[in-house]
Amino acid sequence: MTGPTDLPLPEPARAPRPVTATTAAAGGPQPAPSVPSAPLTVAVVGGGQLARMMAPAAAELGVSLRVLVEDPASSAAQVATDAPVGTAGDEAAIRDLVAPSDGRPAASVLTFEHEHVPNALLRDLGDHGVPVRPGPDALVQAQDKIVMRRRLSALGAPCPRWAALPADPAAARTALAEFLAAAPDGTAVVKTSRGGYDGKGVRVVSAPDDVADWFDTVVAGGPELLVEEKVPFVRELAALVARRPSGEVRTWPVVESIQRDGVCAEVIAPAPGLDPETDARAREIAVSVAEGLNVTGVLAVELFETRGADGRPEIWVNELAMRPHNSGHWTIDGAVTSQFDQHLRAVLDLPLGDTSARAPWTVMANVLGSRLEALTDALPEVLARFGEARVNLYGKGIRPGRKLGHVNVSGDDLDEVRRRALAAAALLRGDTVPSETVPAPTTHQEHA
Ligand SMILES: Nc1ncnc2c1ncn2[C@@H]1O[C@H](COP(=O)(O)OP(=O)(O)OP(=O)(O)O)[C@@H](O)[C@H]1O
Ligand SMILES: [Mg+2]
């Protein structure tokens, strides 16, 4: 009998020989080029923080990212090595993004970090064999809130009462007045159908005059308007799902998203106290929308939670985003697979990753505006006081209320996790945070 030590050992791995002038001149075998011949390349339209956060995920997967940025100093351009400049409406720039004229490899797929991309061009690229994910037929549902409401209603997704307002100002006034008359509290929410973000393009109204300026904009060729019932929600939730072309879908735990001044300020994962039935229902809605609209990539479904007449929770769809979403930033540090990693997998039609949470709680706090000259000025204090916090700064210029970064904190005690995430974000905004208001975390090491 031979013992295990008698087994022949494999040859030790040899480090590849560096290419030097001497080895080349020696006439030995020519080394393989150090650049892979056909790397997977994902082309992304949009140079904001969402494209920026795809970069680390792409690097880990060995995928090349090519990002069309509006400005060479934009958030994504600072981290992407391949970042041609052009707008989302620049047809030549988008064609060159997917099939560069300078001999760089063609992109494996075209995807987006925002939805404001001309649909006709995407359709044409798709017709010429470029994988566009999500496809234009899906994307239009996230570009236009009237198209979205129509389609969601047809799919049977729960929507608040809504109506498209006519383009003619007099007819729009009459329609809005009738809608308001039927509202229990005489108020409603008017939205621009296209181009809105971060609450811009959303107005609570109690009379047609409240949107007189928007009626004029429509006449001048601006986006159409819709009106929605003002939903008496107890809180806002978001369900995030990823779907790949071959049909595989994965949902993350449903989260609570807290808005301030119409902008997402904080996300708690999972949504505290969410009953399992509502969690399952929200995920089901997200999957049925992803399947019904043939979405590929990440889809975020923003939801309202209300109480029914019997006191039981009910959910309603607010809107859709067909890309990684602010409500999913917690997944970077709080889930096994982040939404950015998953989006790349999904658009490349690769197997999707585990979406379970890594900790009982993760809180994401946005940094919205700052009094500092540079957010990095706060790093010495933030990093010293919040060693467990995962700080993510987007490299953007400071403007009031602008999304400049976020902080993720995970742990076992929700109150503590939340306090610390908010305090770290407050320091990055330039606020003073006395140490007694945020005690040091109780970690497992301290108890050991
Ligand atoms: N029908 C509604 N009833 C009550 N509140 C609403 C309604 N629609 C929107 N809101 C409030 O306004 C916020 C912004 O609305 P919405 O999500 O439609 O706009 P947006 O600007 O496209 O969003 P985002 O900030 O996600 O880009 C919602 O998160 C919610 O707080
Ligand atoms: Mg929204």
Image: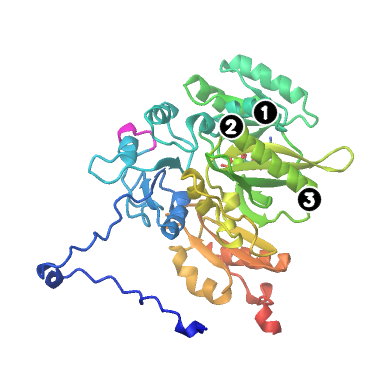
Percent position of residue 89, x then y: 38, 33
On screen, 201 above or below 428? above
Evaluate if marks 3 and 1 touch, with contact meaning CB atoms under 8 Å apart. Answer: no
Q: Amino acid at mark 3?
A: Pro
Q: Residue 155, labelled with which disc?
A: 1
In the image, what residue occupies the spot 77% across and 52% down? 274
Ligand 2 is found in which quarter of the picture?
top right
| Residues packed near mark 3 inside 10 Å, few (<14), some (14 to 19) or many (20 plus) | few
Q: Residue at x 62, y 63 (%)?
A: 422
Q: Which residues are magenta?
A: 88-92
The residue carrying mark 2 is 293
Dots 2, 1 in contact, CB < 8 A: yes
Return the residue found at the far right. 310
Return the x and y of residue 146 as percentages of the image width and height. 60, 26
For the residue labelled by badge 2, is the local secondary structure a helix, a strand or a loop? loop
Identified at 43% across, 63% down, the residue is: 374
Q: Which residue is mark 3?
A: 276
Look at the numbered disc 1 and give the secondary structure of its residue.
helix
- The three-letter amino acid code for the residue at tag 2 is Leu
Quadrant of residue 141 within the rendered picture = top right
